[in-house]
Structures are given as structure tokens and as C-alpha cells.
Image (cartoon, rainbow, N blue to C red):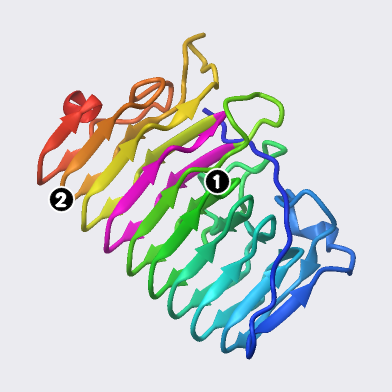
């Protein structure tokens, strides 16, 4: 299915941390806007960075964070551009926040248009999300894990918000539980740990007129793949995907995937 979504932003102050507040007008040339408000350009090198507002990484520029990047409650980072992001340690995503990281030619923006190429965003640690509104992770290298618990707008079409994890290389695990929105999927990733998809809810209807969320397909997983309590149950849907290659065990709803 085409991945479409809309989004939001805000952030707190920590001592000794760079804190940015959005005010400038976004560059209209960057393509589909991810954040819901006016996006401010951000690039350059920071020790530790906490964002407050709606931000984007301009195409052709680089954002480097030498320790931790935090996206505060309600805040938004739009790196769904041809810019580059390097974070040496973890990215922390707080309640109601949005993280859009990476582009590939398979990426589809909220207006239906694709990325024009493939980026090389790298996270040296993990992406840790506590009740995010959503994340859009595409074509990234994650040296730790992707762990997300809760969040989303709830099981609704209004706003229509998706949570795609596609075409990444993850050296740890992928764990996503209790997210509720329009569509969620884990597709075409290489994962050196395990993948766990539990109790996620999606209301999207696919090309076949059937419930379409919780698509888990075409992944290469060196550990286990476990899927439990999702609504709808984990499936291929209309992704056009192929069975997952799993060197460990396939468990629960993903036993046949």
C-alpha cells in the first residue's frame, strides 16, 4: 500500500543541551512536509541536541549529533529529505512526537510523491520511543535497536497516520507494541537480532478491500520473529511482499509469514 501520513511537535530544556525553537519558514523545495506546522531548517554539528518545534534537514545538508538526540513531547523532526543525519548514540522520541528518518526510492510521502534517491542516515545507538505519534524509518542503519511502546492517534482515519519501518539495517532488535493508528508495517529490513510485533492496531483498508495494517514481509531476520495480539493479525496484506527469511523461530501470527 502507499504509505501516507501527517504529523506534530514541542520540547523541554535540559542543562548543557542545545535547544532549538521553531520560528522560520520551511523551504518549500524539500518535498512532502512531514511536520504539521511550519518547519525550521536545522543542520550542523551538536554535542547533545533537544528539539522544540517542527524541524527539517535540508536536502544536501548534514545534521550530526555527537551524543543523544531527543525529540520532546509533541515535537517533530522531518528528515524525510535528501539531507543526511548522523547520531552517535540514541535517539529518544517522547509522547506525541514524530521522527521521520531517511529516504529511499520506495519511500512515499504524505502527498503520494516518492523520495528522489536514497539517503545514508546512521544511528550509532538505538531509537527508543515512548508513545510516539508515529515514526517513519526508511533506509537507515541502526547499530542498536528500534524499540517503541504505545502511542499513535488511536484507531482512527482522522487523522490518517501511518508507522512504517522499511528498508533498514538494524544490528539489534525491532520491538513495537501497543501502537494504534491507520497503518503499521515492518517490510524489507535486515535485522541481526529479533523482531517482536505485539498488540498493535491499524484501521487501514487495503487494495483488496480488507483490513491492511500490521504488514510484516520480506524481512531478513537472524533471530526470532514473534507476532501476538495484533488487530488485524500480522499479515502480508497488499504489500506484494514475500515470506520473511528467519534464522530463528517464527512465532504466533507470524508462524506462516
Whether residue 92 can be seen here: yes
Q: For residue 246, what is the image quadrant?
A: top left
| Vertical arrangement, residue 173 with respect to residue 204, above or below | below
Q: Is residue 175 magenta?
A: yes
The C terminus: image quadrant:
top left
Q: How many marks?
A: 2
Q: Which residue is mark 2?
A: 223
Q: Position of residue 251 (x, y in %)?
A: 16, 32
For marks 2 and 1 on the same chain, the one whose residue lies earlier in the sequence: 1
What residue do we see at 26% from left, 46% from top?
195
Tell me whether circle 2 and circle 1 mark residues in contact (CB < 8 Å).
Answer: no
| Vertical arrangement, residue 87 with respect to residue 177, above or below | below
Determine whether, in the image, residue 205 is placed left or right of residue 43: left
- Residue extent of the magenta highlight: 162-182
Determine whether, in the image, residue 62 is placed left or right of residue 209: right
Q: Is residue 108 magenta?
A: no
Label 1: how many Cα within 10 Å (few below 14, some 14–19, many 20+)? many
Q: Position of residue 111 (x, y in %)?
A: 72, 38
| Vertical arrangement, residue 15 with respect to residue 79, above or below | below
Magenta stretch, main secondary structure, is strand
Q: Which residue is mark 1?
A: 107
Amino acid at each position: 500500500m502507499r504509505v501516507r501520513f501527517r504529523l506534530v511537535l514541542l520540547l523541554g530544556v535540559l542543562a548543557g543541551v542545545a535547544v532549538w525553537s521553531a520560528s522560520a519558514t520551511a523551504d518549500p523545495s524539500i518535498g512532502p512536509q512531514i511536520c504539521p506546522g511550519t518547519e525550521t531548517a536545522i543542520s550542523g554539528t551538536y554535542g547533545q541536541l533537544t528539539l522544540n518545534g517542527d524541524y527539517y534537514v535540508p536536502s544536501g545538508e548534514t545534521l550530526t549529533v555527537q551524543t543523544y538526540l531527543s525529540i520532546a513531547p509533541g515535537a517533530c523532526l522531518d528528515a524525510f529529505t535528501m539531507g543526511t543525519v548522523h547520531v552517535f548514540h540514541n535517539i529518544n522520541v517522547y509522547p506525541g512526537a514524530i521522527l521521520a528518518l531517511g529516504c529511499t526510492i520506495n519511500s512515499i510521502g504524505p502527498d503520494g510523491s516518492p523520495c528522489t534517491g536514497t539517503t545514508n542516515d546512521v544511528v550509532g545507538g538505538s531509537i527508543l520511543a515512548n508513545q510516539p505519534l508515529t515514526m517513519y524509518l526508511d533506509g537507515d542503519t541502526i547499530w542498536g535497536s528500534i524499540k517503541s511502546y504505545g502511542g499513535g492517534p488511536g484507531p482512527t482515519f482522522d487523522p490518517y497516520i501511518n508507522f512504517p519501518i522499511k528498508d533498514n539495517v538494524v544490528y539489534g532488535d525491532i520491538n513495537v507494541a501497543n501502537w494504534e493508528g491507520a497503518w503499521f508495517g515492518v517490510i524489507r529490513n535486515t535485522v541481526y537480532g529479533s523482531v517482536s510485533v505485539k498488540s498493535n492496531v491499524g484501521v487501514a483498508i487495503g487494495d483488496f478491500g480488507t483490513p491492511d495494517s500490521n504488514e510484516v514481509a520480506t524481512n531478513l531476520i537472524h533471530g526470532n520473529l514473534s507476532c501476538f495480539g495484533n488487530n488485524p493479525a500480522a499479515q502480508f496484506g497488499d504489500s506484494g511482499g514475500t515470506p520473511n527469511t528467519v534464522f530463528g523461530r517464527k512465532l504466533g501470527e507470524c508462524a506462516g509469514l
